Amino acid sequence: MPIKVMDEGARRRMATRAFNFGPPNSLKTTSALLTAHYPLQILSFPGETGWGTIPSGVPGLTSYVWEEAPGDPITAASVRREVNDVTLNILAGKAGPCKTLLLDGAHKLHTVYMDEVTSGAFS
């Protein structure tokens, strides 16, 4: 049955997710740093440029950023695989303890998937 009375289990599942969105430089990442439960792991997706606001040297904070080496041949499929692998490793606990996972720049990831299914024609 699609509609049901909310119970404690359903409320708890939905209360564990948040989706912050807004224009550039509107302190989305900064607010997450202040409200997240630590240990916190942040994965900045390819194309996201706001990761410069993430501090370094904070206990319980691990941040992953996408950085392409000049001249390195990459494909949409290899980008997707690496993003998926890192995300799954964090969720599986292979990257250390994680109480909060922040996926930064998710709105940029669709181009990777579109490029993969269109063999690069999207970009």
Image (cartoon, grey):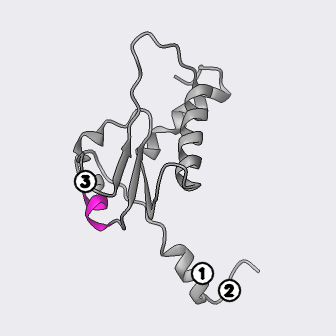
Q: Position of residue 111 (x, y in %)?
A: 52, 33
Residue at which label 2 appears: 4
Amino acid found under the numbered disc labelled 1: Ala
Front position in the image: 30 or 65: 65
Is residue 65 within the magenta segment? no
Badge 2: residue crowd in 10 Å (few <14, some 14–19, many ≥20): few
Q: Which residue is the extreme one toward the right? A: 1
Residue at which label 3 appears: 58
Amino acid found under the numbered disc labelled 2: Lys
Residue at which label 1 appears: 10
- Looking at the image, residue 118 lies above or below residue 86: above
Query: Principal SS element in the magenta part?
Result: helix
**Do labels 1 and 2 touch, CB within 8 Å?**
yes
Q: Earlier in the sequence, mark 1 or mark 2?
A: 2
Q: Quadrant of the N terminus?
A: bottom right
> Left or right: 116 with respect to 49?
right
Magenta part of the protein: which range? 30-35
Amino acid found under the numbered disc labelled 3: Val
Q: Residue at x 32, y 53 (%)?
A: 22
Q: Position of residue 39 (x, y in %)?
A: 38, 61
Task: Say what secondary structure mark 2 lies in.
Answer: loop
Q: Position of residue 10 (x, y in %)?
A: 60, 81
